[in-house]
Image (tube, rainbow, N blue to C red):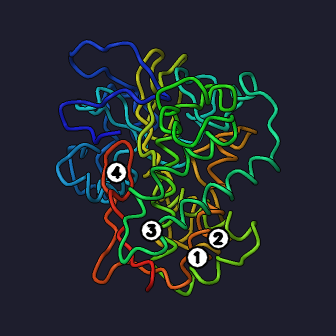
Amino acid sequence: MSDESNSGIRRHAWAKLPPMEPGPAPRARAEAPGGRARATAQPPAGPSRSRTVAPSPLDPGATRDPYRVHRVLREEFPLTFDPLLRAWVLSRYADVATALTDTRFTHGHRPGDPPCAQTHVDVDEAELRSVTARTAHVLARRIADRPNADLVADFCHWLPAGTVAAAVGVPYRDMMRLVRGRAASALAGQCTSQISVREKALASFLAHVLADPERARELRDAPSEEIARAWTESLRHDPSVQIAVRRTAAEVRVSGGTIPAGEPVALLIGAACRDPERFRDPDRYDPLRDDPGQLTYGSGACPAVLLAGLEAEYSVRALLEAMPRLRLAHGFRPERTGLINRAPRSLLVRPGG
C-alpha cells in the first residue's frame, strides 16, 4: 500500500466512508471554563497552550516522524477538525480505544473485533502453527547463503501470503494472487485484505528485534509467550496502521468536547499507543513491558490476528536458526515511513553476521 499525500487521505480498507463534499469544518461543542459549551473545534486557551492552531497528522515531516505531531495533538488538541483529513481527530488512548469498539461509532472493521466471529470458520490452530513454521523456514533457508539480503523484500513480503497459501492448499507458486484473490476468504473472511498490514507489522517487529543482537539471541529459543509480548510491544510502539477512520452514529462525548452524530472521525492509533496516561515511558520499546497493550488488532478470535502472531514467532525462530549470526547491515538503521500505514521500506541484513 503506497503512502498517502497531503492532498487527502485514501480511505482505509477497514473504514470505507462515502465521499465527503468539501466545505467548512463542522462545529463541535468543546468544553469551556465553568462548564459552559462553546461552538469551536479547539480546546480553551490557557497558560499551558503553546500553539493556537492544531497541527495536522498530514503535515510535512510527519511521514518520517509522526510522533511529534501526535504529542502536540494529544496534549493540547484532544479534539480538533483537520481540513486535510476532512475529519475530527482523536489522539488520546481512552478516546481512540472507545471509538474502535463503541457502537456509537460505525463504518469500521479491525481483525479481532466482534464482527469477525460472524464471518470466520473454525480453524485448526495446530495446523496453522505447523504451516507458518514450515513456510518461515523455507523462506529463511532461501536467503541464508546470501552475503546480503533485504528482509522486507525477501521475507516479510512473502511470509503472510505464503502462510495463508499453505493453509488453504494453494500452490506455493500462486501464493501472491491471494493478495487480490478469493482463495484466502475461506480462512480469513473480512480480514483477507489484511495481508499487507501483516507484512508491515512483521517488518517493524523484525526491525525491533534485530536492533539489539542480544535480544535477538534471547528470543530465538524463548517461550511463545515471551515472543508474543515482544510482538505486542512492537504493535504498540510502531503500529503498522497509524490512522483508522470511523463515523459517529450518535452524539459522543470525548476529551475536549462532544462530536455530533454523522461526523467522520480520524483515530490516531499511533498517538494513542504512546499516550503517557496509559503507558509508562511510552516512547521506549520494552519487550518486557508490564503494562502491555496495542490497538492494531482487536482482542477477539480471528485467524488474521492468530496468523500475525504466529508469523512473528516463527520468523524469529526460522531466521535465527538458519542464520545464527544474522545482523543488520553495517551502518544501516531501519527507517519507518508512512502516514496511514507505517513500516520500514527495507531491512538490510548480513545473513552471516
Q: Tell me the element at label 2.
A: helix
Say which amino acid is labelled 2: Arg
Marks 4 and 3 sit apart, C-alpha to C-alpha, by 32 Å
User: Is 138 or 302 nearer to us in this picture?
Assistant: 138
Q: Tell me the element at label 4.
A: helix
**Disc 1 versus disc 3: nearer the observer:** 1
x and y, in percent, of residue 23 in the image: 21, 15
Marks 2 and 1 sit apart, C-alpha to C-alpha, by 6 Å
Q: Which of the image's four quarters has the N terminus?
A: top left
Q: Which residue is mark 1?
A: 320
Q: Residue at x 42, y 46 (%)?
A: 242
x and y, in percent, of residue 103 in the image: 63, 23
Say which amino acid is labelled 1: Leu
Q: Residue at x 26, y 58 (%)?
A: 64
Contact between labelled residues 1 and 2, with CB atoms less than 8 Å apart = yes
Marks 3 and 2 sit apart, C-alpha to C-alpha, by 15 Å
Q: Which residue is mark 3?
A: 207
Contact between labelled residues 2 and 3, with CB atoms less than 8 Å apart = no
Upstream in sequence: badge 4 or badge 2 = 4
Q: Which residue is mark 4?
A: 76
